[in-house]
Image (cartoon, rainbow, N blue to C red):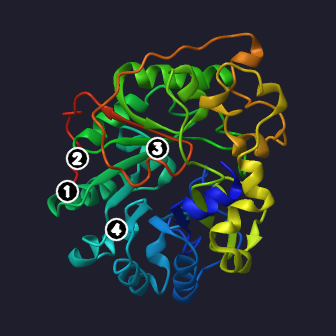
């Protein structure tokens, strides 16, 4: 599809980082904690007016810490789009019951299946906060998704996190750790493939935009995705094709001037780029060179994805069981994998006050 066709036809999944403030200081987070940045309600209004937006996700920091948070979500709920938010629980706790109903889905960050590890990495009380607010959402009829980062400290245990998510009829959405600030938590090649094998052996797949997983699972080419269907606006007022894209990004003024034509700019073209070595690969349609953001972070945009088995002379077939389709706002917005546990974890939550 040409850039012109993409620009004229595409509806966008818009990621908005209202602020980079957070009440926690997780060591694996990609946000920049060294400065305070915010975008305004007026900027949000102009951004939404510049694009054909089908969904907005509020991410990056804890959006509830923005001084105009409540006015921004009240404006967004009146627009013809679906609004979601990713939170450690703090921003959700700040919502009134009425405001909670504005959201099509609330995502809670949960990287472990137990209090000790979750609170150990994110901060005391976070385990209970997530469970309390997830239960509140379900009581209010607001869908919940649990989101985890697949990283060195948890890659073997994510199926158990999916079982915890199932308590709230929630899928588990997984992003592979990207070395935006540090590679301490980055998966090795073998850990990446073991992590997905363990996960997919024990859960049912709803969808995946992780290119290599699509290829090795025998899934067809994906429509949309990074470089043509997603736009990320950072709290600094810059524009990127993907939340993990390195560099400061283009100024917001460029998006406001070009609208959907932003997909014709160099970063978006790079996000759609195909390494020459992948041109004749039998999996090129499904994979397209792997994750461009990961390649860019590794300073190897023109080379195949670091986790590609084919260029290593290997083959990593994945057996997947597909779950019933679910209408999830984030299913086409990033290189993300969404699964559903086959049964819920029924163990004691450990004196969580619901």
Distance from the alpha carbon under mark 1 to that under mark 3: 19 Å
Find the residue positioned furthest to the left. Answer: 139
Report how many numbered discs are placed on residues in the image.
4
Q: Position of residue 317 (x, y in %)?
A: 54, 14
Q: Secondary structure at mark 2?
A: loop
Q: Which mark is residue 138?
A: 1
Q: Position of residue 180 (x, y in %)?
A: 71, 50
- The quarter of the image holding the C terminus is bottom left
Of the pair 337 and 326, the residue shown nearer to us? 326
Mark 4 sits on what residue? 92
Task: Name which residue lies at 39% across and 67% down.
Answer: 83
Q: Secondary structure at mark 4?
A: helix
Q: Secondary structure at mark 3?
A: strand
Instruction: Kindly indicate whether the residue at mark 3 contacts the one at mark 2 (C-beta within 8 angstroms).
Output: no
Q: Does label 2 or label 1 sit earlier along the sequence?
A: 1
Q: Does label 2 or label 3 sit earlier along the sequence?
A: 3
Of the pair 149 and 328, the residue shown nearer to us? 328
Mark 3 sits on what residue? 148
Q: Does label 4 or label 2 sit earlier along the sequence?
A: 4
Up the image or down, 272 lies above or below 343; here it is below
In this rendering, would 163 be left or right of 285? left
Q: Is residue 125 visible?
A: no
Instruction: Kindly indicate whether the residue at mark 1 contacts the one at mark 2 (C-beta within 8 angstroms).
Output: yes
Please rate how many residues cluster around mark 4, counting C-alpha atoms within 10 Å: few if below 14, some from 14 to 19, many from 20: many
Task: Name which residue lies at 43% across and 28% down.
Answer: 157
Please rate how many residues cluster around mark 2, counting C-alpha atoms within 10 Å: few if below 14, some from 14 to 19, many from 20: many
Distance from the alpha carbon under mark 3 to that under mark 4: 17 Å
Distance from the alpha carbon under mark 2 to that under mark 1: 7 Å
Mark 2 sits on what residue? 168
Distance from the alpha carbon under mark 4 to that under mark 2: 16 Å
């Amino acid at each position: 599809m040409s850039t012109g066709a993409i620009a004229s036809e595409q509806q966008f999944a818009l990621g908005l980082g209202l602020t980079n403030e957070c009440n926690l200081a997780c060591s694996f987070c990609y946000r920049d904690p060294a400065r305070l940045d915010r975008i305004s309600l007026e900027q949000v209004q102009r951004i939404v007016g510049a694009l054909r937006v089908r969904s907005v996700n509020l991410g990056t920091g804890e959006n509830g810490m923005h001084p105009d948070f409540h006015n921004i979500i009240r404006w967004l709920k009146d627009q013809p789009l679906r609004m979601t938010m990713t939170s450690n629980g703090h921003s959700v706790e700040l919502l009134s019951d009425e405001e909670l109903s504005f959201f099509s889905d609330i995502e809670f960050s949960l990287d472990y299946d137990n209090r000790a590890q979750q609170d150990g990495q994110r901060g005391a009380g976070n385990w209970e906060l997530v469970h309390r607010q997830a239960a509140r959402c379900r009581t209010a009829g607001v869908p919940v998704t649990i989101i985890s980062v697949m990283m060195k400290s948890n890659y073997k245990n994510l199926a158990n996190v999916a079982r915890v998510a199932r308590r709230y009829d929630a899928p588990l959405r997984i992003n592979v750790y990207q070395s935006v600030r540090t590679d301490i938590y980055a998966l090795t090649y073998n850990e990446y493939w073991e992590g997905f094998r363990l996960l997919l052996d024990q859960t049912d797949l709803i969808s995946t935009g992780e290119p290599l997983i699509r290829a090795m699972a025998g899934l067809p080419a994906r429509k949309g995705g990074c470089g043509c269907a997603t736009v990320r606006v950072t709290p600094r007022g810059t524009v990127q094709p993907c939340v993990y894209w390195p560099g400061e990004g283009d100024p917001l003024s460029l998006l406001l001037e070009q609208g959907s034509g932003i997909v014709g700019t160099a970063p978006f073209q790079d996000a759609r780029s195909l390494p020459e070595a992948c041109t004749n690969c039998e999996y090129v349609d499904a994979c397209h060179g792997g994750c461009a953001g990961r390649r860019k972070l590794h300073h190897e945009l023109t080379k195949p994805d670091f986790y590609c088995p084919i260029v290593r002379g290997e083959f990593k077939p994945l057996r997947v069981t597909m779950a019933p389709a679910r209408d999830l706002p984030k299913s086409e917005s990033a290189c993300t994998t969404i699964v559903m546990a086959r049964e819920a974890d029924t163990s004691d939550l450990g004196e969580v006050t619901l």
